[in-house]
Amino acid sequence: MPQTLSKQQLVDVANEFGTPVYVYHAEKIAEQYQNLKTAFATCNAQFFYACKSLTNINILQYIQSIGASLDCVSINEVKLGLMAGFKPANILYTPNCVDFDEILEAKNLKVNINIDNISILEQFGNKFGATYPVCIRLNPHIMAGGNFKISTGHVDSKFGISIHQMRHIERVVKTTGLNVEGIHMHTGSEIKDINVFLEGLEVMFTMAGHFPDLKYIDLGSGFKVPYQPGDPETDITPPGRKSGTGF
Ligand SMILES: Cc1ncc(COP(=O)(O)O)c(C=O)c1O
């Protein structure tokens, strides 16, 4: 387990670089990544760091070096990820209500594209058919997250295509020949209640049956992590391995 940075180390950094100064702890990042890998060791899982949380290029390079993939919500995040050394195959672009030109740019950069509305799905399908596989972001209609502003999967959310529009999605896929290789959902961040993830999984497994070419399910939603001593956290340690530190 990595040491936490001591007060003296932080004072030394401040003396050397001046303040304000941001300090990131690489070993802690690696530990958290390892916790995830351990928790899901029995599945064929790949972890995507949501770079919206911090796009410092050095951190992105570090995260790439330890084997993680990258979740980007804007085309500039995609470009930054490529600059940091992520392979296009390890970048997932999940924009929200962007212009079709940005989607085309992402396609030219050969990254994975997650489409979150019917109009773009239709335009993409009409232009490329089955030649460029896509992922579809679904709105599972689950209310979750630390507060309303970081809840993304509820009925009024702008994120994703409603699961109740499945017949419309299927019509677009059928008429354009789109190759849907992934489906994605994100219900919110700072989630303490494990049942939310189970509920989301249930929805996704049901939806998966609509896509015969599906290769993966992309499960978004953020675990609650402690920011202050005493804060609650989501325990992702699998049963039977409970002696660890949790997450
Ligand atoms: C597509 C997507 N990825 C990632 C995130 C980041 O959230 P978290 O890391 O808490 O899951 C969000 C938040 O809205 C999101 O919409």
Image (cartoon, rainbow, N blue to C red):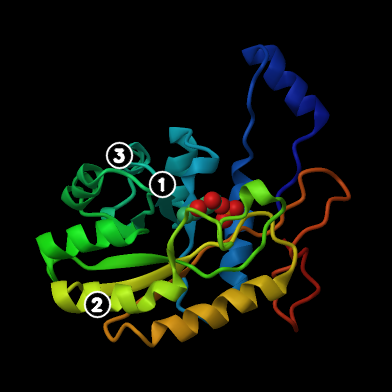
Indicate the position of residue 147 as horizontal and vertical percent values: 71, 50
Q: Which of marks 1 and 3 is nearer the N terminus?
A: 1
Name the image quarter holding residue 112: bottom left
Question: Which residue is pictured at 29% across the width and 53% down the height?
Answer: 87
Residue labelled with disc 3: 79
The amino acid on which the numbered mark 1 sits, given as a three-letter code, is: Val
Name the image quarter holding residue 4: top right
Q: Which element is circle 1 on?
A: loop
Residue labelled with disc 1: 73
| Depicted 216 relative to depicted 83: above or below | below
Tell me the number on the disc at residue 126: none
- Quadrant in which the C terminus appears: bottom right
The amino acid on which the numbered mark 3 sits, given as a three-letter code, is: Lys
Indicate the position of residue 52 as horizontal and vertical percent values: 49, 42
| Depicted 11 relative to depicted 29: above or below | above
On whether ligand 1 comes within 8 Å of the CB at mark 1, the answer is: yes
- Bin the neighbour count of mark 2 within 10 Å (Cα to Cα): few under 14, some 14-19, many 20 and up: few
Question: Which residue is pictured at 16% across the width and 49% down the height?
Answer: 108
| Depicted 189 relative to depicted 197: above or below | above
Tell me the number on the disc at residue 171: 2
Name the foreground residue: 66 vs 230.
230
Question: Which residue is pictured at 64% across the width and 64% down the height?
Answer: 35
Q: Disc 2 to disc 3, how far (Cα)?
A: 33 Å
Q: Which element is circle 3 on?
A: helix
